Amino acid sequence: MAEKLSDRSALDPLLETGWQMVEGRDAIAKTFVFKDFAAAFGWMTGCALIAEKMNHHPEWENVYKTVKVTLSTHDVDGLSDLDIRLARAMDRLAG
């Protein structure tokens, strides 16, 4: 079972790579832009496989080559280590 983040310093490296706190929610968000739809969809597929293994699924929206992602752990009504781990994996896959 996930636990709500108590040590918020784990967010600092993510905020340096373009993740932002979501106003009015305990969540982080980032917009990823790829060269085309196929690259965006391929990235989403890779992220989906990781998310499924983690049993932690993002909120996301895809329009052509742009993917907007929001991460929050609904079970704890806020951010957890699952969000940190998934954000890092998404950044790694995006290159």
Image (spheres, helix red, strand yellow):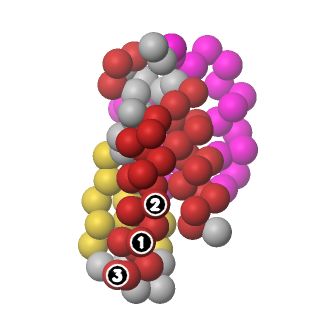
Q: Is residue 81 above or below residue 17?
A: above
Which image quarter holds the C terminus? bottom right
Quadrant location of residue 22? top left
As drawn, the label of residue 37 is 3
Asked which secondary structure carries label 3, the reply is helix
- Label 2: few (<14), some or many (≥20) within 10 Å? some
Which mark is first along the chain, 3 or 2? 3
Q: Is residue 83 above or below residue 13?
A: above
Say if mark 1 contacts mark 2, CB within 8 Å: yes
* Residue 17, position as x, y percentages in the image: 66, 56
Q: Disc 1 designates what residue?
A: 42
> Which residue does the image show at 39% across and 62% down from the upper left?
45
Seen from the viewer's position, the closer of residues 42 and 22 is: 42
> Which residue does the image show at 39% across and 33% down from the upper left?
55
As drawn, the label of residue 46 is 2
Q: Is residue 4 visible?
A: yes
Q: Is residue 71 visible?
A: no
